[in-house]
Each structure stands twice: as C-alpha cells, then as structure tokens.
Image (cartoon, rainbow, N blue to C red):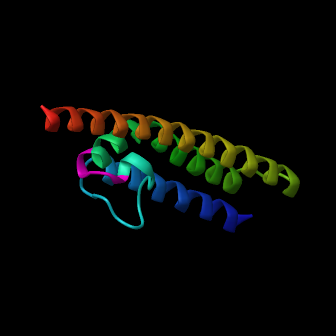
Amino acid sequence: MEIAGVVLIVAGIVVVWGAEVTASGRLGINGLIGLRFGALLMSDRAWHLGHRAARVPIDLAGAFLILTGILVLTLDLPEDAVGILVIFGAIAALAMIILGSVLGSREANRVLGEDNESSSS
C-alpha cells in the first residue's frame, strides 16, 4: 500500500505544479503539460487565461490526490478499504479536472471571441 500512497502524492504534486506553471504564464503551449484541447491551443493568450480560469479546480484535484495518498500511508486500513479510498480520491480528482477543463475551455473560447471581434474592427 505504501507504493499507492507515494504514487498518489507524487501525482498530486505534479498536477498542482502543472496548474501553477500554466496559470502563471511560465509555461506556454506545449506537448506535455496542461489542458490540451480546443480553444486552449488556439493562442498563447487563450492558453494562459484558460489555465488561469481552471487553476482552482485543478489545484483541488491535486490536493485530493495528495490527501488520498497521505491517508493511504497513515491509516491502518484493510486492503479493500484502501482500494475504496483510492477510488473515491481518484473520482474526486477527476471531477475537479473535468470542472477545470470546462471552465478553462469557456474562458479560452471567450478570449478567442474577443480577439476575433477586435481584429475585425
């Protein structure tokens, strides 16, 4: 069970780090880190502002993974209870990633709409 706990903690740290570097503008469009679909990939501005809009839910996803990992490592639970805990932690993280993706996509689409309006004027 220790491996599962460590993997969850490391995954959570990577998720939070990715959310922070993309939302802060330190990491632009790339092939590895960040939300990689649709309007978010259409411009640097859409990428940055979309990730800023997604930052809180994605940070929460990372926090859920880290918390789940800590609980797996510290609680003396039977193996099947650990499995249930991991599943619930993963579902909570996935829900936050989906929410962040929706918010980021909406913001990126809004930004692209603004950019198209200003360039056609």
* Numbered marks: total: 0
Magenta stretch: includes residue 15: no
Q: Is residue 97 left or right of residue 111?
A: right
- The x and y percentages for residue 40 are 37, 48
Q: Is residue 97 left or right of residue 53?
A: right
- The residue drawn where x is 40% and y is 41% is 55
- The percent position of residue 89, horizontal first and vertical second, equals 67, 46
Q: Is residue 36 left or right of residue 21?
A: right
At 40% from the left and 55% from the top, the residue drawn is: 18
Question: In the rendered view of the protein, which quadrant contains the C terminus?
Answer: top left
Predominant secondary structure, magenta span: helix
In-front residue for pair 39/98: 39
Q: Considering only vertical position in the picture, is 86 above or below 52?
A: below
Say which of 89 and 25 sits in front: 25
> Which residue is at the far front?
120
Which residue is rendered at x = 67% and y = 49% of the image? Answer: 90
- Specify the quadrant of the image occupied by residue 56: top left
Q: Specify the segment rendered in magenta.
A: 41-45
Q: Is residue 104 left or right of residue 71?
A: left
Q: Residue at x 32, y 51 (%)?
A: 42
Q: Residue 1: percent from the left, percent from the top?
A: 75, 64
Splitting the image into 4 quarters, where does residue 108 fall? top left
Depth check, front residue: 23 or 64: 23
Q: Where's residue 8, x and y in %? A: 61, 58
